[in-house]
Amino acid sequence: MVGGYLVALIDKVRLKILEEIYKNIPPEAGLTKIEFEGPEIAIYLRDVKSVLEKEELIKSIAKIIKKRVVVRVDESSRKDFSDALEIILNEVPPDLGLTKEDVTFDEVLGEVIIKTTNPTAFFKDKRQLYNKIFMETGWRPRILRKPPLRSSILESTVKYLISQSEARRKILRSVGDRIHRDTLFKDPYVRITALGGFQEVGRSSILLETQESKILLDFGYNPSAPTLKQSMPRLDVANIPVEDIDAVVVTHAHLDHCGLVPLLFKFGYEGPVYATEATRDLMILLQLDLLDISKREGKPLPFDLQDVHKALLHTVTLKYGEVTDIAPDVRLTFYRAGHILGSAIAHLHIGVGLHNIVYTSDFKYGKTRLLDEAHTEFPRVDTLLMESTYGNATQLPRDEAEAKFVDVINRTLQRKGKVLIPTLAVGRAQEVLAILATA
Ligand SMILES: [Zn+2]
């Protein structure tokens, strides 16, 4: 009877996932547990060798259950830190210049974070080096690109996330519980409400509602608004408590799209924030900067450092093109937006083929010095929400504009003049520098 009762408690979606995994994992892998870890299903094994050797196995399980799957080694079968470190330093070719300072262990998730200037070296020849480290140490490698210049913000972000790993696992589990469940309603609808950034610049935010879920697309800040209320998205119009929101999607790190995400946490939001990895890192930098500037200007914001950290802890990073369940009836895929580092166009697939929305957020149609152009081919689109900044302005073709820009600078310098270039700090400034560097 107890067994029957337990089965009744697990809903159909979960039961199907568990069944398929048990059926497909070979017995020699020693399956110990399955966890719903945010949008991913984590499979813990005693020995990953047999699974890593059958390259297609995990992919085919993921395909059957239509979920993202991650494999980890059970705690009892991982090498201790010093042995694992020795193996890693021995296996990594000396020309990669890896030192022990580049290697950090995340005990809670069973991951080893390896910082390197050459991440591709770990994945070449069918992930040979990556798989070897994973098999021999039992620690799942997470390869991070080491920036050419030391970045204290990046280092402190990684350090903070590892120090809060236990809290993060709890968050991911509760997010996982909310995503991987049966849908409850049979009368589907999709509603979009503009909360900010429509016919104005700043405080961009859209509420996407279905009968099952509520998702915020961006939650920006408008620093030039005369009052605090006017600088915030109109969550009051939506009239929903923040606890009812299932997910927040951040398209890019400009503050008019993500500046007030920490405020949601101050109000009591406990759910996930989805962004690309680069957006997460830039977002923290800009939110901390925003706090600092507001304080110095005597216009303190209604959130503080703690809320920025809380937002970071709840951020789940996604790669471009990775289809991810963010609610029982909503799948999110990020595509390249060509706007700034990490910027994304969000494609949302709702229900089983019910409706498809593309929210472009800020995007750049052409290629730039630093970024490829925006992705423009989507599997299905029923509703397109398109940012229109500069959409009504006629601009010079890129090569003509660049030539004119360089010419003005050269003429000024010839007259022994000085050139000041007022520009947006994140994205545009780097693009301008790249033009000057090659002029
Ligand atoms: Zn932007």
Image (cartoon, rainbow, N blue to C red):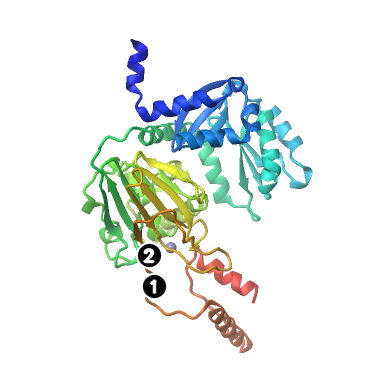
Beta carbon of the mark 2 residue lies under 8 A of ligand 1? no
x then y, percent, for residue 293: 42, 60
> What residue lies at 59% left-to-right and 20% top-to-bottom?
76
> What residue lies at 34% left-to-right and 66% top-to-bottom?
201
Q: Quadrant of residue 173?
A: top left
Asked whether 146 or 150 is in front, the reply is: 146
Disc 2, disc 1: CB below 8 Å? yes
Q: Which residue is mark 2?
A: 387
User: Label 2: how many residues lie within 10 Å, few (<14), some (14-19) or many (20+)?
Assistant: some
> Element under label 2?
loop
Q: Is residue 276 above or below residue 66?
A: below
Relative placement, left or right, of 49 versus 163 is right
Which quadrant of the picture is home to ligand 1? bottom left
Residue 303 appearing in the image: no
Q: Is residue 392 above or below residue 77?
A: below
x then y, percent, for residue 168: 46, 35
Q: Which residue is mark 1?
A: 391
x then y, percent, for residue 43: 52, 28
Tell me, for residue 369, which label it has, or none.
none
> What residue lies at 28% left-to-right and 66% top-to-bottom?
226
Q: Quadrant of residue 167?
A: top left
> What residue lies at 66% left-to-right and 25% top-to-bottom?
79
Real-space Cα separation, disc 2 to disc 1, in angstroms: 8 Å
- Amino acid tagged 2: Glu
Asked whether 233 or 163 is in front, the reply is: 233
Beta carbon of the mark 1 residue lies under 8 A of ligand 1? no
Relative placement, left or right, of 308 versus 427 is left
- Amino acid tagged 1: Gly
